[in-house]
Image (cartoon, rainbow, N blue to C red):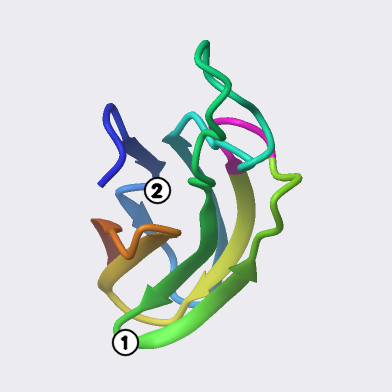
Amino acid sequence: MAKGVKPRVKVPKSASAGEAVTIKTLISHKMESGQRKDGDGNVIPRSIINRFTADFNGENVIDVVLAPAISTNPFFEFEAKVPESGTFTFTWHDDDGSTYVQEKAIEVS
């Protein structure tokens, strides 16, 4: 598990049924490409977030596969329609097998 990884998510607390809401996510992650060397000349192992998913009440909303050229601290902004009250589950997958999960509830009126 990479050190200092911190996911952040912004989801509105409420919405109208069928409304498209804007969701913003950011994860603090250094993202090593596997091509740099440390002070002793050893290759620093690759460590990137290689996949990001967002689900709403168990249904996939977005699924993004990331390449080594992705920047440090990847940020995603997207819209999702919310037909009912529920929970968004955001998951970031790391090269080392770690997953970072954050959940946010939204109330539909």
Is residue 92 covered in magenta?
Answer: no
Q: Position of residue 1 (x, y in %)?
A: 25, 47
- The residue identified by callout 1 is 58
- The residue identified by callout 2 is 11
Q: In this view, which residue lies farthest toward the top?
A: 39
State the image quarter where residue 31 is shown: top right
Is residue 73 covered in magenta?
Answer: yes
Q: Is residue 109 visible?
A: no
State the image quarter where residue 73 is shown: top right
Q: Residue at x 43, y 82 (%)?
A: 83
Is 49 positioned to the left or the right of 102 in the image?
Answer: right
Q: Position of residue 16 (x, y in %)?
A: 44, 66
Q: Which residues are magenta?
A: 71-75
Relative to 45, residue 108 above or below = below
Q: Residue at x 58, y 39 (%)?
A: 74
Relative to 59, residue 5 above or below = above
Q: Residue at x 29, y 61 (%)?
A: 99
